[in-house]
Image (tube, grey):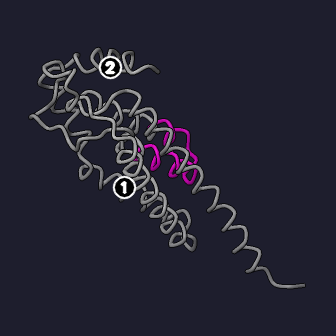
Amino acid sequence: MPVEIDQQLFLYLNSAHSPLWDEVMRFLSMTGVWIPLYLGILTYLGMTYKRKFLIIISFLIIAVVLSDQTALLIKNTVERLRPCHEPALQGLVHTVNGKCGGMFGFVSSHAANSFNIALLSLLFIRKKWYSVSILIWAAAISYSRIYLGVHYPVDVVCGAILGACIGSGVYGIYTVTDKKIQLRKRPLS
């Protein structure tokens, strides 16, 4: 997508704001408020997978670190300014409480991390209601970054794709590892 189209789409999406939505979107972007959700996911996985739980936790940690650090590496390599730091957009970007974040925004870490958690957890949980809910959650967090003026749509979409790929990739590695562990546990005939 050409930069001009990305900027115009950003300005369109970012311009629809109100005091109520400012607070809702700010809340959605706060990572700490999602700790109860993460604990709920971990509790469900612990009750469902019992003996495999520690292995699953290890893979979850690997996925989160990979997603977060890969997004950071891409940001520092590409060095695309966030919309709120872009000189050509000064005075046009709506931010909440003047918060803009670091200088660079491609790719969105929030989008990468939320889609990583969403994809990886839905592959373990495999309930339709959960899959729909967790994907809506990840999309809402991702959209909040555009609303808050800190990411372009392409930053968010690419972050979401990155996170989803890492989450599904780590799940694939988990399934291969789990099969190998199960084969080793079988008694020899």
**Quick check: 93 above or below 48?**
above
Instruction: Answer few, some or many: residues within 10 Å of disc 1's Cα (few below 14, many 20 plus, some between 14 and 19).
Output: few
**Quick check: 147 above or below 161?**
above
Horizontal relation, residue 167 to residue 103: left or right = right
Front residue of 47/118: it is: 118
Residue that numbered label 1 is attached to: 38
Horizontal relation, residue 1 to residue 169: left or right = left
Q: Which residues are magenta?
A: 113-133
Spot occupied by residue 111 in the image (x, y as percentages of width and height): 39, 40
Spot occupied by residue 157 in the image (x, y as percentages of width and height): 44, 32
Q: CA distance from mark 1 to mark 2?
A: 33 Å
Spot occupied by residue 185 in the image (x, y as percentages of width and height): 73, 80
Mark earlier in primary sequence (1, 2): 2
**Quick check: 137 above or below 169?**
above
Mark 1 and 2 residues: CB-CB less than 8 Å, in contact?
A: no
Residue at (35, 51) in percent of width and height: 37
Instruction: Answer few, some or many: residues within 10 Å of disc 2's Cα (few below 14, many 20 plus, some between 14 and 19).
Output: some
Residue at (36, 59) in percent of width and height: 39
Q: Amino acid at mark 1?
A: Tyr
Q: For residue 114: magenta?
A: yes
Disc sitting over residue 54 in the figure: none
**Quick check: 72 above or below 52?**
above
Residue at (38, 56) in percent of width and height: 40
Front residue of 162/83: it is: 83
Residue that numbered label 2 is attached to: 7
Q: Secondary structure at mark 2?
A: helix
Give the image quarter of residue 145. top left
Q: Amino acid at mark 2?
A: Gln
Give the image quarter of residue 184. bottom right
